[in-house]
Image: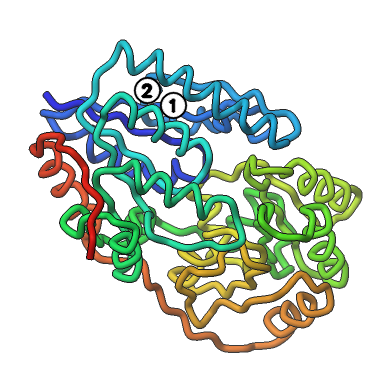
Amino acid sequence: MKKIVIFSGSRADYGLLKDLIKNLKKEKNLKISIISGPPHSSKKYGYTYKEILKNFKIDLKIVSKIRNSSSHEILQQITNTISQLSNYFKKNKFDLAIVLGDRYEALAFSTACFFFKIKILHFHGGEKTVGALDDTIRHIISKFSDFHFVCNKIYKKRLIQLGERPKTIFNFGAVGLADISSIKFLSKKKINEILNLRAERKNILVTFHPETLSILQPKKQITKIINALRSFKKQNIIFTYNNTDLQGNKILTEIKNYSKNKDNVYLFNSLGRKMYLNLLKTSSVVLGNSSSGIFEAPLLKTPTINIGNRQKGRIFSPSIINANYDTNEIKKKLKSIILSNKKFKFKSYFYKRNSLKEILYKIKEILKIRKSFKEFYDQ
């Protein structure tokens, strides 16, 4: 019996990993353990660990202690997470650890696995997002990891540049896109009924996170966007909560203040992956700097207005329009989509058929490999 531990740091990665977990749990010779990261246990973000419990048992739930998302609190969170993981790994042995992405919770998990000599399989390495601290965190996790499942050949090449051995890197496409073809999408009318949105209005979906390496402070970043949105009073403007990034609370405060007493502005702390994808599919545009605007939106044929540099470095579909933190520029680009019948070319660079099947097969192959000394690969 091989033992795999899977880490879901927050709502951001659980929806992407859910189908993989479900299929791994069907394997008779595998024992799957799940660890939920601190943001899942946050009241502010909707206690999203409950989404996991609808389908799976949580073997270790790490509690959130973040209040104001300062550098000090985030470092305290990382320390607390590593400490709890250390105690857990001292009592529980695993053959493989699975982690996705580039957030600091994932860094804490990877650090603990590395020192307990657990083989690490990392999803979404090799990508580049120059406007966020996540960019460096992602590369650090890649260096901790023994195996890499990337979503594009360009990202495989970048990992080789980082000294990772080519035979440990596999391009299966984005694991989070594997389930989209099986989702039974709802009509816009039904979605509006469920979320209590005005049915006759077009939807503008806004998902914005702090651009942590920008010289412009997060409060000013979101203010530029909000000022652009003030002109759109005949559309539903739907905000989702930002992640628990550095100074993320300042963004959330501004959004809450803006949404007060406005009948066309809505704010949801967590929609769940299926409802979010339904809303994304039926929106006229997704605005912000979320990776969903880069990965899911083109596949669902929804245009994206990508703000700033948080996603800069990723491969963009022709349906993604870039904008600076300039109120007039954002307003102009929104109008070009909302108030016209502009046609877009949609192309997904990350979706692959049968990717989940290939991922499952390769994981079982990896479990047969004995842990070996990892050497830097010189090209």
Q: Position of residue 152 (x, y in %)?
A: 32, 67
Q: What residue type is labelled 1?
A: Leu
Q: Establish if 98 lies above or below 199.
A: above
Report the quarter where the C terminus lies.
Answer: bottom left
Q: Measured along the vertical axis of the image, is residue 227 above or below residue 85?
A: below
Left or right, residue 12 beside residue 263: left
Name the quadrant containing residue 348: bottom left
Residue at horizontal 20%, vertical 29%? 95
Nearer to us in this view, 339 or 88: 88
Crowd rating for badge 1 (residues with CA inside 10 Å; few <14, some 14–19, many 20+): few
Nearer to the camera, 139 or 46: 139
**Where residue 215 sits: x, y (%)?**
75, 60
Which residue corresponds to the image point at 47% horizontal and 63% vertical from the top-left?
Answer: 128
Element carrying mark 1: helix
Name the residue carrying label 1. Answer: 53
| Residue at the extreme top | 91
Residue type at mark 2 is Lys
